[in-house]
Image: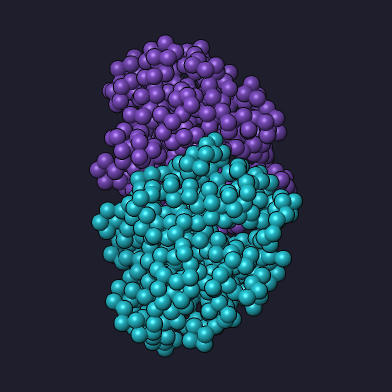
Chain colours: A purple, B cyan
Amino acid sequence: MREVAILGVGQTPVAEHWDKSMKQLAGEAILAALRDAGVGHADALFVGNMLSETINRQQNLGALVAQEVGLRGIEAVKVDAACGSGASAFRAGLIAVTSGAVDIVIVAGVEKMSDSVGDEVTAALATAADADFEAAMGLSFVAINALVMQRYMDAFGWKHADFAPFAINAHANGQHNPFARLRHAVTEKEYERARMVADPINLLDASPTGDGAAAAILAPVDIARRRGGAKPIVTIAASAAATDSIAIHDRHDPLTLMASKLSADKAYAAAGVGPADIDVFELHDAFSIMAALSLEAAGFAERGQGPRMGLENQIGPTGKVPVATFGGLKARGHPVGATGMYQIVEVYRQLIGEGGATQVPGAKIGMAQNIGGSGAAIITHILTTG
Amino acid sequence: MREVAILGVGQTPVAEHWDKSMKQLAGEAILAALRDAGVGHADALFVGNMLSETINRQQNLGALVAQEVGLRGIEAVKVDAACGSGASAFRAGLIAVTSGAVDIVIVAGVEKMSDSVGDEVTAALATAADADFEAAMGLSFVAINALVMQRYMDAFGWKHADFAPFAINAHANGQHNPFARLRHAVTEKEYERARMVADPINLLDASPTGDGAAAAILAPVDIARRRGGAKPIVTIAASAAATDSIAIHDRHDPLTLMASKLSADKAYAAAGVGPADIDVFELHDAFSIMAALSLEAAGFAERGQGPRMGLENQIGPTGKVPVATFGGLKARGHPVGATGMYQIVEVYRQLIGEGGATQVPGAKIGMAQNIGGSGAAIITHILTTG
């Protein structure tokens, strides 16, 4: 298989972009990525998106976005795994390059949620849950996560305040990221006093949705090497995806993200590394409980001990396992189908030393993990440099 | 790149399956394909689907269907290009096998349209058109095709009756296919008298939608050869995809399916064949005008001369370019996101000699072409045997 490098990346701020359409957002991120990569053409485009069918009344996103960036005619398709769509598109683009079918590939994640009407977004997000057994009971997506968090606290003896470090770290990092939706620090007191959403998940346990797009340009590493340049070459050392039951009640263990474990273990094996080698881990902290469960399933913490990583100051940029270094889903924001590509862009920026105020010192190996549904589809990528 | 073979196929009838859910339909087709292939496991699942987010309120189809067929945990994702989703999923699965990332892959197309309420399907299908410039004007999908057909008739001097052979051939073939939605022959008189839908498209110009699922099992050809067996080995000689503007008014020429031409030309070059070598062509006859335009763009007829192929009796199973040999979209039915996989299954069955009453004598090279939108995303596959 051909080794694949990232030639460049681009992103828009996560915000309520009332003045831009979905295709304009995607176009902005892609054109920035093409400029960053120094290329003017691509052989194929893979778009990650979750909600365009309901919120934007628009399908055929591949063709739509290809035309928007002046590449009408090229192969283009949408890849979908709910909130895991971004990384799923990245994996599809990566496989296309490794197969030899194409050379230069654009992968973009995009979501334009502010086009919604009324409570459409809550209903649309619930389609990531099991329509027959969860959504049909009236469970919203945050309610499902609240049930998991409640059970987790009960099973392992944690209290709500023990999850505070996840929000505090994400916001501390996000305030330095010009692309982040929420750019203010939060304190433990603010965390504890935040308005309840679905007990025990309060506003500071939950990531804000938003509009946004992020993109990367992929090519065989030989092309990256021939081009040279000042930036370190970042390659994709491993890519793996796995699934679990959609409904939580079907899980063998509702407190283990089995698809996280399966995909992370595959990725570690492919890259020849282990959790201890990962310098930065962009995890899917849609809710603070998901941050804890991800740290455990991906091998950074013992079962039931995820919150300890935060309480022991191990998740900051200079900690043992830096997470949410640009704000994570919690502060950068969670434009659902685009999030997986924001994670890739952020790991890439850490590896080339563009982390700014939240740069992880000497980061050489980074991991991104994107989750679709309450752990139903999980995709893990490991990126390396030098 | 590794050469890839089809190990087996499965399909459900296209119908209104009131007694089966979307995942049950997908499961039925996949389990039939696994039985046909003689395998009990797969490394990955690719699902083609267009409307589950709106009609079935269900995303995460990869994980949903993987669990349904007893393969919880495997990599699984949905691939989407509107009505071209089936072939897009097939191409993604094919690329995954050629890349070496996986060996045994399931590709399934599924659509469950009868779960819709009121006129939801018409609105949902319009999402394949341009939301800002077509759907926003109130144009339904059939209305867009009606405008194209009207202009085509005007430009090239055809009258409505000249399109009759497309419907007559599709229904003549479909009546022998137990999986077809419409199993009755139609006459020229019936065609001319059919109820108008959107002038000049009448009921016999338009394909019926429906519920259904079709699946195929892919593997490196070495695995197929080692297994031996009585059935001829069918390999994928070429796969190509291309795009065009979504909105018809943006086209360089609204009467040329440029993405059909681009993807067919790429596929011919890759397979080392030309239109004259194709023994059977499963084209995307969602409307009779699309059958005419596909024959032209794919090189079987001169520009503006597609209807001549029907009038000169060249499209039947023993004609020069057999199309819709199992009924096509027109008579087999058009469960939108599943259609591309029905086409693959049908070309495969022709190549292994299971065409029954509509077998194309000595078929060795078959082509399937699947269209998303009014020509916005087009995917071409060429399959060969012995």
Position of the C terminus of chain B by quadrant: bottom right
Residue in front for this viewpoint, B233 or B369? B233
Q: Which x, y percent locates residue A67? A: 48, 60
Total marks drawn? Answer: 0
Please tell me which residue lies in front, B189 or B265. B189
Residue under the point 49% across and 16% down? A304
The part of the image, by quadrant, that contains residue A287 is top left
Residue A255 lies left or right of residue A366; in this view the side is left
Closer to the camera in the image, A97 or B369: B369
Point out residue B39 in the picture as x, y percentages from the top left corner: 62, 46
Determine if residue A157 is in view: yes
Q: Quadrant of residue A270?
A: top right
Relative image position of residue B269 (x, y in whole percent): 67, 68
Q: What residue appears at the point 61 percent right and 38 percent down from the top-left corner?
A: A239
Counting from the top left corner in percent of width and height, residue B323 is at 53, 74
Residue shown at the point (57%, 81%) measured from the top left: B319
Image position of B214 with respect to A249: above or below: below
**The N terminus of chain B lies in quadrant:** bottom right
Nearer to me, B77 or A177:
B77
Tell me if I can see residue A81 in this picture: no
Q: Going 52% across and 36% down the picture, which residue do you hit?
A: B72
Q: Quadrant of residue A174 in the image?
A: top left
